[in-house]
Image (spheres, helix red, strand yellow):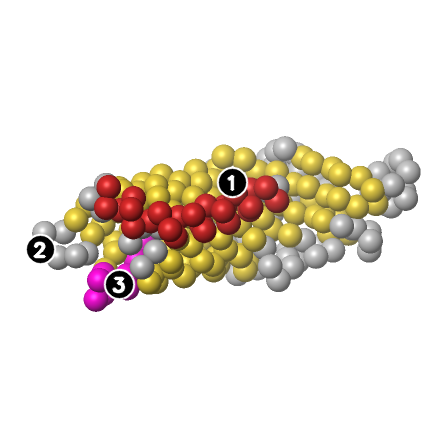
Amino acid sequence: MKKTSFLFALLFLLTSISQAQTLSERTDNLVIIGADLFTDFNTGAAYENFDLRGINQGVSVYTMFNFKFDNTPHFASIGVGYTGHNFYLKDSYLSRPYYDYAVFSDAPSDFKKSKVNVNYIDIPIEVSFKIKNQFKVSAGFKFGILATGKSKYVGSGNGIFLFDEDKIYRAKFGRINNLEKYVYSVTLRVAYKSVHIFGAYQFSDTFKNGSGPEIKPISIGIGVRPF
């Protein structure tokens, strides 16, 4: 994901903090527009030449419609959104993105960047419980539909490309053949007014069974949305 995407998401977070209450009032608390910035930690099994760095930043944006419960401040929500995951590799790169199984090869020691980027269209469902009109706890489920899967390598061509080994190359592959079409996650948010701490666990595999690394990320981050 390009750096501009994260700058846009950060700007959205900052402006939403100031506009969240106004939006909430105008829609009579029926509509939520929110965003999350997070990092992923993989809980899946080991895979050859697949080792992630400590921080794997991602972004999520969404809109949801609220269904209020009678005689209570609590409510349920359903909506649509987008989530982008970036899995940064420590010392390897995806060398066969178009095969039916994933192969990760050793990268040169001086490489700059190597990552797998996966993007989903989401259908989130949540139940939210308000506490003392300022705190809120939301628990839910998110169904993700694969939109795109890409990989990127930035570094020298030493041992990779049959060209100038000392030149810095930027290799992008716009398709990964063996990703699962659907993923499933449970989510949790703990909010104070417009700002919340976000957590999610994807309990389904990112890659098709037996065709790639077992990526089942835990996502932890911060976000904003109308209270």
Q: Identify the mark at residue 71; answer none if there is no mark.
A: 2
Tell me the number on the disc at residue 119. Answer: 1
Q: In which quarter of the image is residue 41?
A: bottom right
Helix, strand or loop at mark 2: loop
Q: In which quarter of the image is the N terminus?
A: top right
Tell me which residue sits at (23%, 60%) in the image: 129
Tell which circle, 3 or 2, labels the residue nearer the N-terminal end.
2
Q: Which of 146 and 80 is in front in this view?
A: 80
70 falls in the magenta region: no
The three-letter amino acid code for the residue at tag 3 is Gln
Give above or below for 157 relative to 196: above
Q: Which of marks 3 and 2 is in front?
A: 3
Nearer to us in this view, 110 or 224: 224
Name the chief secondary structure element in magenta.
strand
Vertical placement of residue 144 versus 175, above or below = below
Residue 84, position as x, y percentages in the image: 51, 44
Would residue 118 be visible to someone looking at this image? no
Of mark 3 and mark 1, the one earlier in the sequence is: 1
Q: What element carries label 3?
A: loop
How far apart are the alpha carbons under marks 3 and 1? 33 Å
- Reading the image, the residue beneath label 3 is 134
Check disc 1 and report its element: helix, strand or loop: strand
Return the residue nearer the eye: 84 or 179: 84
Question: Label 1 crowding class (10 Å Cα cut-off): few <14, some 14-19, many 20+?
Answer: many
> Eyeballing the image, is 192 above or below 6?
below
Comes first in the chain, label 1 or label 2: 2
Crowding at dot 2, Cα within 10 Å, few <14 / some 14-19 / many 20+, comes out as: few
Name the mark nearer the viewer: 3 or 1: 3
The stretch of residues the image draws in magenta is: 130-141
Which percent across, then down, holds residue 184?
41, 48
